[in-house]
Image: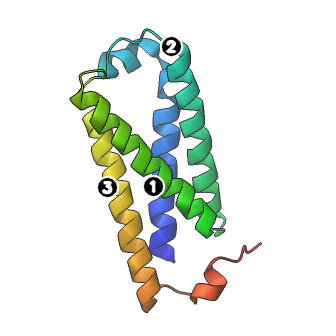
Amino acid sequence: MEAVRKSLLAQGGYYIGTGVAPFISRRAFEAVTGPKKEWWLVETVGLLVTAVGAGVATAAARDRVTPEITIVAAGCAGGLAAIDIVYAARGRISPAYLADAAAQIALLAAHANASRRHRHGSGNRSDASSTEPTG
């Protein structure tokens, strides 16, 4: 279970960092990602990504990793990777977003590897107890 927690903590930290980036400096954000016409959309996505990151990181830090948290984490990583790849390929967003897609895919791979290791008995607890919150 420790590997699962570490991968979720990594995702949470990455999401918090990338989610708040547009609020720290619009100029720096646009220097990396390109100019944006719909800044409200950048802020909306930033807030949502930050919220997901905070939730995932908090669950992992408190050892409250549930199947639901894992689904949210994997679903966000897969969805963001797909959006990055499709829209960068279409020329709608900067190719810089392909770096984010690579990070999202790396997070998915880390989750898959950690989950596989946990299922095959290298976790510290049984599967039954791993989904129960501890206090």
Rendered image quadrant of residue 128? bottom right
Crowding at label 3, few (<14), some or many (≥20) Cα neighbours within 10 Å?
Answer: some
Q: Residue at x 26, y 36 (%)?
A: 98
Crowding at label 1, few (<14), some or many (≥20) Cα neighbours within 10 Å?
Answer: some
Q: Amino acid at mark 1?
A: Ala
Residue 44 position (above or below residue 66): above
Crowding at label 2, few (<14), some or many (≥20) Cα neighbours within 10 Å?
Answer: few
User: Which mark lies nearer to you, 2 or 1?
Assistant: 2
Residue 22 position (above or below residue 12): above
Q: Residue at x 46, y 82 (%)?
A: 118
Q: Residue under circle 1?
A: 10
Q: Amino acid at mark 2?
A: Trp
Q: Residue furthest top?
A: 37
Q: Residue under circle 2?
A: 39
Q: Residue 106: give its label.
A: 3
Find the distance from the CA under tag 3 to the CA under tag 2: 28 Å
Q: Amino acid at mark 3?
A: Ala
Side of 135 where 14 appears, left or right: left
Q: Residue at x 61, y 47 (%)?
A: 54
Marks 3 and 2, the one that precedes in the sequence: 2
Q: Secondary structure at mark 1?
A: helix
Indicate the quadrant containing the C terminus: top left, top right, bottom left or bottom right: bottom right
The x and y percentages for residue 97 are 30, 32
Marks 3 and 1, the one that precedes in the sequence: 1
